[in-house]
Image: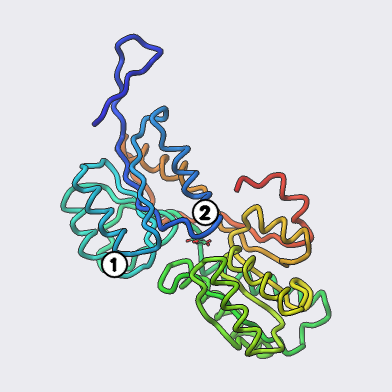
Amino acid sequence: RKSIEIPTEEGMHRDLIKVGYAQVGAESDWRVANTESFKSTFTEENGYELIFIDCQQESENQIKALRNFIQQEVDYIVLAPIIESGWDSVLAEVKEANIPLILSDRMVNVEDDSLYMTWVGGDFIQEGRNAILWLNQYLEKMGRADESINIVELQGTLGASAEIGRTNGVAEMIAQKPNYHLIAIETGDFIQSKGKEVMESFLKTYPDIDVLIAQNDNMAFGAIEAIKAAGKVPGKDIIIISFDAVHAAFEAMIRGELNASVECNPLHGPRVAEIIQKLESGQKVEKIQYVPEGVFDQENAAKELPNRLY
Ligand code: GYE
């Protein structure tokens, strides 16, 4: 391990724990907050050397990043997998090299779960359910519970845990309401500009959209632009529900353009550091750790905004 001089105590050295983080990319506000959380936690001051690789939403880059970490003999690998599939062989290489692997944010789909030590992130299926539970209550309040409701959905990156879970959670709850109709579903890759593009095409094809579910805030922001450009009022003519609850989502709720955002917490840096500290001291860690999350809407957005950390 690389050592640093500890400035306060003459001649003292401290070994840094070398951590490689293979990050998804920089596709959203959530992701930027996640990166910042790791960079501000895994500092030399805190006893770490962080090797951060932005994989630009390309699975190939993530596989290369992991091999690079093996070569650099890091002490721990942290992976936020872009998609769930395709991990068996490279994770076997990591295991072979005896490097503990910590999954953060998204999951992998592997046959042998000894290929990773632990996973920490959001409960994406529950988030999906929560979006429709919020909608049920809102329509009830508006006296529209029995109306026929046309829903369109913007999915995240296909095959990513956050997409799979939210898609399934939303679908499960829609299936319980015979008057809800999912009329269109398409990916916008968690990216604002793609959210705008796909929403433009939805608006052209379907003149009677009642609800938009966007699987992250940024795609909702793009869609809001498309809705305005089509001469409709976001948040009124079309009810909009998204995921993450980043700062800008609170601002959009306060403006009345976004109706609700289902929280997904990106501040995993300290959580992963805690896991590493436990492993360093020989303690056991839980295999799966869900982070508690809420739902915010126009009624509580203004009050909550000052408390938000991302
Ligand atoms: O919702 C989205 C980001 O995996 C939970 O990825 C994460 C998702 C998040 O791009 O904004």
On residue 291, the disc is: 2
Q: Amino acid at mark 1?
A: Val
Whole-percent x, y for residue 232 in the image: 76, 78
Does residue 214 appear to the left or right of 44 in the view shown? Answer: right
**Which residue corresponds to the image point at 82% horizontal and 77% vertical from the top-left?**
142
Q: Is disc 1 surrounded by few (<14), some (14 to 19) or many (20+) residues within 10 Å?
A: some
| Residue behind mark 1 | 110
Does residue 248 appear to the left or right of 198 in the view shown? Answer: right
Q: Secondary structure at mark 2?
A: loop
Whole-percent x, y for residue 283 in the image: 33, 40
Does residue 168 appear to the left or right of 240 in the view shown? Answer: left
On residue 96, the disc is: none
Query: Is label 1's Cβ within 8 Å of ligand 1?
Result: no
Is 116 placed above or below 210 here?
above
Q: Is disc 2 surrounded by few (<14), some (14 to 19) or many (20+) residues within 10 Å?
A: some
Whole-percent x, y for residue 188 in the image: 52, 73
Dot 2 or dot 1: first in sequence order is 1
**Which residue corresponds to the image point at 30% horizontal and 11% vertical from the top-left?**
11
